[in-house]
Amino acid sequence: MLALGKLLELTLAGREPAEKTQLTVEGVRMRWLSEGALEVRPPEARDNGLDLLLSAGIHGNETAPIELLDRLLHDIARGDLKPRARILFLFGNPEAIRKGERFIEQDVNRLFNGRHEQSSGSEALRACELERLAASFFSVPDRQRLHYDLHTAIRGSKIEQFALYPWKEGRQHSRLELARLRAAGMEAVLLQNKPSIVFSSYTYDKLGAESFTLELGKARPFGQNAGVNVSLLETRLKQIIEGTEPEMAEHGLDGLQLFSVAREIIKHSDSFRLNLPADIENFSELDVGYVLAEDLANTRWIIEEQGARIIFPNPKVKNGLRAGILIVPTTDENLA
Ligand SMILES: O=C(O)CCC(=O)N[C@@H](CCC(=O)O)C(=O)O
Ligand SMILES: [Zn+2]
């Protein structure tokens, strides 16, 4: 296999490859751009006009998505997977991946859309570099742009695989993209309704891509991901890469559950208390009247929404950051 197919090994070893560009037997060009960043370009005659950004390891301990991208890259480097799309593979936070930690000093996925400019340290620099790599990749006009930022979650979930779809003023969420996610095994999608500072929001808002954060199961160390079943997603990604995706019935969301954000729970101070059991699962329902959280100056977060559920509850985040999202079921009536 070509050395550049071993991007993960290079990244884990903190090594720069001697040769920055290599050609596969199929004439596919692989180009190492920076640590954890590799561009794959099909021969011009085979290029189908899709630019696909696949990122994982924005959180260093979320290894199932990293292993998935590693398998795709190996297949491409061996000539077993024949891309018709241009692809950018990104391993988001190499230092944290090496340490098996979510982050080292600060969460990279809270540093996009300009936030890194108000910060410092290696993770702020990395967020800036990821923005630059994505912007350069998505700078070619008249091409389709798609970004999947792959994650696994801290806790178990009543709905195992789901996506978060960013928001931008004046832009509608695409029914066709939701059908594609359904076919890729996603059981639910959270439709965001305000701007955000995560990677997928940056590529959606600033670079015009169709972008999603995908949650694929529970985070575990390398080699222990048998419980994370990514087979439907992997099959779909291979079809997208090779341009062999079956036709999608535009209206067929096929049981995909849709949610919208009711409120983001923000931790304001060290006095913040989240009144949930430590092992609560994502998508757990909360009753109206329940006191979800308490903070400084007797601030209380009380459930007012019928059918409210909680995702990503985390009282350990830094002050000023999201300590959970309250979501409610929604319909497909505003989709484009
Ligand atoms: O399990 C958790 O609490 C977090 C899992 C995770 O990393 N999720 C992403 C979601 C990004 C988004 O809002 O689109 C994150 O929190 O960064
Ligand atoms: Zn994550």
Image: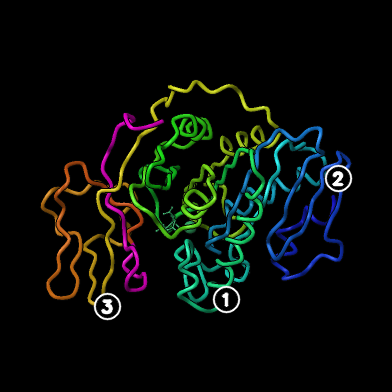
State the SS at label 3.
Answer: loop
Q: Residue at x 22, y 76 (%)?
A: 271
- Which amino acid, by three-letter code, is at mark 2? Thr
**Is 7 rendered above or below residue 191?**
below
User: Mark 1 and 2 residues: CB-CB less than 8 Å, in contact?
Assistant: no
Q: Which residue is mark 3?
A: 270
| Quarter of the picture holding the C terminus | top left
Q: Which residue is mark 2?
A: 24
The Cα–Cα distance between marks 2 and 3, rounded to whole angstroms, is: 53 Å
Q: Residue at x 57, y 69 (%)?
A: 96
State the SS at label 1.
Answer: helix
Residue 82: within the magenta?
no
Stretch in magenta:
314-336
Residue 19 in the image: state x and y as whole percent. 86, 62
Q: Residue at x 26, y 43 (%)?
A: 328
Q: Earlier in the sequence, mark 2 or mark 3?
A: 2
Residue 150 in the image: state x and y as whole percent. 54, 50
Along the viewing direction, whichever of 25 and 131 lies nearer the viewer? 131
- Which amino acid, by three-letter code, is at mark 3? Asp
**Is 267 rendered above or below residue 249?**
below
Residue 333: within the magenta?
yes
User: Mark 3 and 1 residues: CB-CB less than 8 Å, in contact?
Assistant: no
Residue 254 in the image: state x and y as whole percent. 42, 25
> Mark 3 or 1, which is nearer the eye?
1
Along the viewing direction, whichever of 8 and 119 lies nearer the viewer? 119
For label 3, count other residues whose C-alpha is less than 10 Å away and answer few (under 14), some (14-19) or many (20+): few
Q: Earlier in the sequence, mark 3 or mark 1?
A: 1
Q: Which residue is mark 1?
A: 122
- Which amino acid, by three-letter code, is at mark 1? Ser
